[in-house]
């Protein structure tokens, strides 16, 4: 590893290297959390899932969730990244409808909103793990896509082969 050096200028948003350096920084932070935190596996499954700037923290209890979130927030703060209060939400998945209702996830001066469902990597997750809702959502997306190209598919100006490719 090289010696440390001062950073005088950051990258501007939209710079071609921004996503690459962001991914390096986030990966570094996540690895630090995994090393320093106990219990980052729940039933053999990793409790910290990340894709690009979407990070999911899972916990067997509200206490584990808070502990893992606090670990990630403190490590990201050390390297100059911030967790957005507005974009950070939590969801309790339990057979018990009232599980976690009396708890709020509060880290430092931020209180995170509890939600009943959210979209992660294009999939809608619900607190009841409702598959029918996800199926309806995908059907709506498929219908919207079809209707957006319906005029092209019914046009006599395009060949049959081109319509098949569309």
Image: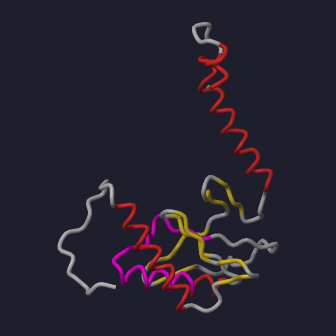
Position in image of residue 46 (x %, y %)? 66, 78
Instruction: Give me the residue at 29% from left, 56% from top.
Output: 15
Residue 155 image point, x, y percent: 61, 11
Residue 134 position in % (x across, y down): 73, 51
Q: Quadrant of the C terminus?
A: top right
Residue that lies at the very extreme toward the top in this rendered image: 156
Q: Look at the image and say whether residue 34 sits in the magenta stretch.
A: no
In the rendered structure, which segment of residues is drawn in magenta? 68-90
Q: Nearer the viewer, residue 31 or 137?
A: 31
Nearer to the camera, 144 or 44: 44
Residue drawn where x is 67% and y is 22% of the image? 164
In the figure, residue 3 lies in which quadrant? bottom left
Seen in the picture, residue 148 relative to 47 is either above or below; the reply is above
Residue nearer the viewer, 8 or 126: 8
| Left or right, 120 with reference to 53 | right
Above or below: residue 49 compared with residue 79: above
Q: Residue furthest front?
A: 1
């Amino acid at each position: 590893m090289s010696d440390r050096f001062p950073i005088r200028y950051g990258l501007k948003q939209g710079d071609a290297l921004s996503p690459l350096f962001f991914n390096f920084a986030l990966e570094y932070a996540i690895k630090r959390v995994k090393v320093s935190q106990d219990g980052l596996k729940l039933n053999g499954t990793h409790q910290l899932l990340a894709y690009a700037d979407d990070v999911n923290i899972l916990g067997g209890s509200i206490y584990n969730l808070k502990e893992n979130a606090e670990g990630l927030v403190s490590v990201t703060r050390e390297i100059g990244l911030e967790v957005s209060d507005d974009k950070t939400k939590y969801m309790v998945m339990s057979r018990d409808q009232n599980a976690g209702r009396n708890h709020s996830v509060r880290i430092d001066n931020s209180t995170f909103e509890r939600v009943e469902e959210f979209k992660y990597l294009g999939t809608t997750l619900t607190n009841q793990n409702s598959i029918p809702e996800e199926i309806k959502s995908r059907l709506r997306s498929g219908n919207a896509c079809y209707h957006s190209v319906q005029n092209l598919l019914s046009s006599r100006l395009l060949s049959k082969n081109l319509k098949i490719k569309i």
